Image (cartoon, rainbow, N blue to C red):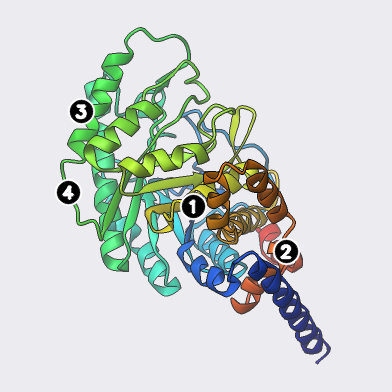
């Protein structure tokens, strides 16, 4: 009874704070009720690999390796089975307002203890995931896994000059697209299949052209099989450099942007895959002029590493602002991509998703029309002043209300709930 009374008081306080925020935003010409309704378009795809440090389920003792990907930390509670991973994702989603999706890598198939090489995977290996997604009423996205495999050890997959190696990876990606299409067909929402390869050179290469020519030929063959757009969307992911590919990445931004425009695929913009002085937010409007849709991999780069837990910072805010200002929420697919084993993995998910949601909420709360009018009038003082004023507006009260009407924990309350899950579940693994 005491807990019920406390919840009622908390609910009343949140509603009062929201009403005050609503009035402040109304003075700026913003209807917060309409903004909250628009948040339904912010459908974030959770990356399964945060729960288990990108290990997957190909073998009982599978570990990340190859491809220049590195997970640091050894915090207790790593998911070791499909059942544990599903339970963790369910817990995460119970702590988030709005709706989400789940993004799977090919190495997360339900192989039932059997050794299935990647050029042999089939939709049946992912049917249990599809059935689970039906139960959860969510969509699935998918990724070919072109790393952590002996045939990726030399640093080249789809651009390999070894024809047998290249054929293996072509077949793998073909099968991944088939699996993704089946996910989209059964779930009634398009599956975004994202392709990232680690191909590149640690030191100065001489024959960049041939590697990129081979990659183009591989992509042409892979994409020659067409699937209905309502089942599958194809996206290709660029990168500036990686660990072991510092001098050259075959799938550069220029290569993939050109390919995406010519072949009408999506391009994946990962904000940890560019030079620290580049801003993905600045690239979005250009890409949207030439492509029907894009895919975001939202992460946080710190110096050389691209995969820290997402927080609400200037970079994330700019990404959200540019999408909202371009009225492109329905043309941008949003996914998270980071892996941190130094802290509670469930907490890492919740922090990242809530930060991304808050960035889009703030962008939707922006008086864009008034800002554009000031800009076009050359009144740059007014433009800058308004942008600064918006930073102190009570968006937190709007987000709390968004959580309240979605029946999820508000503010810092989720911290104790995650710590409870850790004590009752994670530390016992």
- At mark 3, the secondary structure is helix
Quarter of the image for residue 94 reads: bottom right
Q: Residue at x 67, y 56 (%)?
A: 347
Contact check, label 3 and label 2, Cβ < 8 Å: no
Residue identified by numbered label 1: 325
Q: Residues within 10 Å of mark 1 (few under 14, many from 20)?
A: some
Q: Earlier in the sequence, mark 2 or mark 4?
A: 4
- Expressed as whole percent of the image width and height from the top left, the position of residue 376 reads 52, 45
- Expressed as whole percent of the image width and height from the top left, the position of residue 117 reads 32, 41
Residue identified by numbered label 4: 226
Q: Identify which residue, 369 or 172, lies in the foreground.
A: 369
Q: Residues within 10 Å of mark 3 (few under 14, many from 20)?
A: few
Residue 322 position (above or below residue 133): above
Residue 286: give its label: none
Q: Depth-wise, is mark 1 or mark 3 nearer the camera?
A: 1
- Expressed as whole percent of the image width and height from the top left, the position of residue 247 reads 47, 15
Residue identified by numbered label 2: 394
Task: Return the residue found at the far right.
Answer: 2
Label 3 and label 4: CA atoms lie apart by 16 Å
Q: Depth-wise, is mark 1 or mark 4 nearer the camera?
A: 1
- At mark 1, the secondary structure is helix
């Amino acid at each position: 009874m005491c807990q019920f009374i406390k919840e009622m008081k908390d609910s009343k306080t949140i509603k009062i704070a929201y009403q005050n925020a609503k009035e402040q935003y109304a003075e700026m010409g913003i209807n917060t009720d309409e903004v909250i309704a628009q948040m339904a378009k912010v459908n974030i795809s959770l990356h399964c690999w945060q729960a288990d440090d990108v290990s997957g389920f190909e073998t009982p003792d599978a570990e990340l390796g190859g491809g220049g990907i590195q997970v640091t930390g050894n915090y207790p509670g790593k998911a070791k089975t499909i059942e544990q991973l599903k339970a963790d994702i369910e817990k995460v989603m119970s702590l988030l307002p709005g709706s989400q999706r789940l993004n799977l890598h090919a190495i997360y198939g339900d192989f039932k203890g059997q050794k299935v090489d990647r050029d042999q995977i089939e939709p049946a290996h992912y049917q249990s995931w599809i059935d689970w997604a039906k139960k959860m009423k969510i969509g699935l996205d998918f990724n070919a896994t072109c790393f952590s495999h002996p045939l990726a050890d030399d640093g080249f997959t789809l651009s390999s000059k070894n024809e047998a190696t290249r054929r293996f990876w072509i077949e793998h990606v073909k099968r991944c697209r088939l699996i993704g299409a089946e996910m989209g067909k059964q779930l009634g929402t398009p599956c975004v299949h994202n392709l990232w390869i680690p191909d590149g050179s640690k030191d100065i290469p001489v024959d960049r052209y041939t590697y990129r020519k081979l990659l183009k030929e591989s992509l042409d063959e892979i994409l020659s099989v067409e699937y209905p757009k309502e089942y599958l969307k194809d996206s290709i992911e660029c990168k500036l450099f990686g660990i072991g590919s510092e001098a050259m990445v075959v799938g550069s931004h220029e290569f993939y942007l050109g390919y995406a425009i010519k072949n009408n695929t999506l391009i994946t913009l990962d904000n940890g895959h560019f030079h620290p002085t580049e801003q993905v937010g600045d690239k979005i409007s250009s890409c949207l002029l030439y492509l029907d849709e894009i895919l975001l991999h939202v992460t946080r780069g710190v110096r050389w590493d691209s995969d820290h837990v997402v927080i609400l910072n200037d970079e994330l805010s700019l990404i959200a602002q540019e999408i909202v200002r371009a009225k492109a929420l329905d043309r941008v697919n949003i996914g998270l991509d980071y892996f941190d084993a130094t802290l509670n993995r469930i907490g890492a998910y919740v922090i990242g998703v809530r930060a991304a949601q808050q960035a889009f909420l703030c962008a939707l709360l922006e008086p864009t029309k008034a800002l554009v009018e000031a800009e076009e009038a050359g009144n740059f003082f007014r433009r800058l002043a308004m942008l600064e004023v918006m930073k102190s507006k009570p968006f937190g009260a709007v987000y709390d209300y968004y959580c309240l009407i979605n029946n999820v924990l508000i503010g810092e309350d989720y911290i104790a709930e995650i710590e409870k899950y850790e004590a009752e579940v994670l530390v016992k693994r």
